[in-house]
Image (cartoon, rainbow, N blue to C red):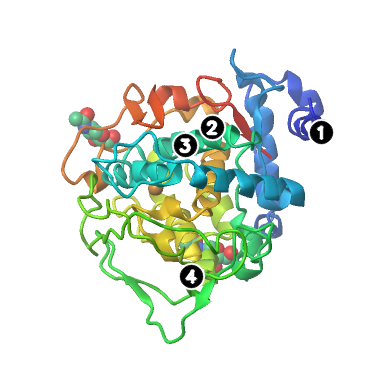
Amino acid sequence: MAPLKTYLLSLLLTASPLLAHKRDLPIPEFTQEEIDSGAALRELNRIAGANAHRLFGNNCSPATVKIRREWRALSKPERRQFIAAVKCIMAKPNTVLSQDEVPGAKSLYDAIVWAHADRSGYMHMSGNFLVFHRYYLHTYERELALCGWDQGLPYWEWGLDVDAPHLSPVFDGSDTSLGSDGAFIPNRPPRVLDFIGFDEPTIIPPGTGGGCVMKGPFSDMVVRLGPIDVLPGEPIPSHPEEGREENPRCLERDLNADPLRRWNTFRNVTELILGYRTIREFQGTLDGDPRVTRESMGAHSGGHEAIGGIAVNPMLSPYDPAFWLTHNMLERVYWIWQLLDFKNRQGVHGTGTFLNMPPSANVTVEDELDLSPHNGPVKIKDLMNSLSGAPLCYVYV
Ligand SMILES: *[C@@H]1O[C@H](CO)[C@@H](O)[C@H](O)[C@H]1NC(C)=O
Ligand SMILES: *[C@@H]1O[C@H](CO)[C@@H](O)[C@H](O)[C@H]1NC(C)=O
Ligand SMILES: [Cu+2]
């Protein structure tokens, strides 16, 4: 095993007498300062990792487990290697998705984005939401491995960047970032988001960009599919008719501290993990589900709005290479939450359609998720343990 991996695993698994523990570790009381500084979240991640050690299945071991780290924990050569793997997926021709169906899907990356667009109404605001994105990230991680990045998918720790996302090592425009902010477009109106089920619209002031990503690795990226307009106040559909042709344009971004401060601080994330015991409340709160909360947005949309540009389109958001890092942070929050009480947090909640429109049956863990043509069907219950090896095999540090 590589020395770095050995070291990270020792941090994760040798919480000394804890290796012998059979039950989940107790959760300590945290001070407000520990919560606001991120120390509490770090400790919760450590406890989750210690609880996880007994869950290794046959096809996943300390030697093979992928360690998902924060972007800043990667060395600069590692960041460059990761970026090269993303570009490799973008450079591979699409050989999986039918050209009759989606003529504009020229690259493998386009085809992966379409897998999200085509299922949008079925895995947003539905019982599939967390587990679908879990499987989607895993599938992308597998493609990255085929492109030379065989480590865990990195994540973006929002709490470190709530004041200035454009200065974040994720977005600073250096050759070790995912590219800069978009070019600044002045005098834009705020976004007025009329979410279904809320009386008042949610107002997001414009961010610091708005135009094409200017500097760094993805300033020359070509976005091909879309646009697909999602009408305000209407449910998000699946199988969109439009947006299937090739329509080359730049990657747009509009980095924005405002949503991060409102929904993605260390306090917000820590309260999400500690404040809710059922999957209904936990998922409903992080996703601003009107059936569960009076807060029209949560950490999920907050992460998208903080990136702006195509990342706020519920169908095409995976076009932004940062989509994978913000969703991986959300997945980390779900992973920690689950592992703090693993045996009681095995369920899903909700039906199989966006806000149950049109009405559909409750999703159950016996149902299958399908990611064709990128990955095979998998039972939701087989996505509950990230260490089963069937198919998942990762931890967060
Ligand atoms: C998120 O946390 C910040 C402080 O870190 C707080 O001001 C804000 O009200 C929180 N948002 C929610 C929805 O609780
Ligand atoms: C679906 O789930 C809801 C909430 O858990 C429950 O009230 C309802 O009875 C379920 N519907 C069916 C058809 O099982
Ligand atoms: Cu999504």
In the image, residue 287 above or below residue 88: below
Quadrant for residue 98, please give it: top left
Q: Which residue is mark 4?
A: 212
Q: Residue at x 68, y 54 (%)?
A: 38
Residues tagged 1 and 2 counted as in contact (Cβ below 8 A): no
CA gap, disc 4 to disc 2? 29 Å
Residue type for callout 4: Cys
Comparing 152 with 360, the one in front is 152
Q: Which residue is mark 3?
A: 134
Q: Residue at x 32, y 27 (%)?
A: 364
Q: Which mark is residue 65?
A: none
Residue type for callout 1: Tyr
Residues tagged 3 and 4 counted as in contact (Cβ below 8 A): no
Q: Position of residue 221 (x, y in %)?
A: 50, 58
Residue type for callout 2: Arg
User: Label 3: how many residues lie within 10 Å, few (<14), some (14-19) or many (20+)?
Assistant: many
- Location of the N terminus by quadrant is top right
CA gap, disc 3 to disc 1? 26 Å
Which is closer to the viewer, label 3 or label 4?
Answer: 4
Tell me the element at label 4.
Answer: strand
Tell me the element at label 1.
Answer: helix
Chain-order first, disc 3 or disc 4 = 3
87 lies left or right of 176: left
Comparing 385 with 275, the one in front is 385
Comparing 58 with 364, the one in front is 58
Q: Which residue is mark 1?
A: 7
Q: Position of residue 268 (x, y in %)?
A: 54, 57
Label 2 CB sits under 8 Å from any ligand 3 atom: no
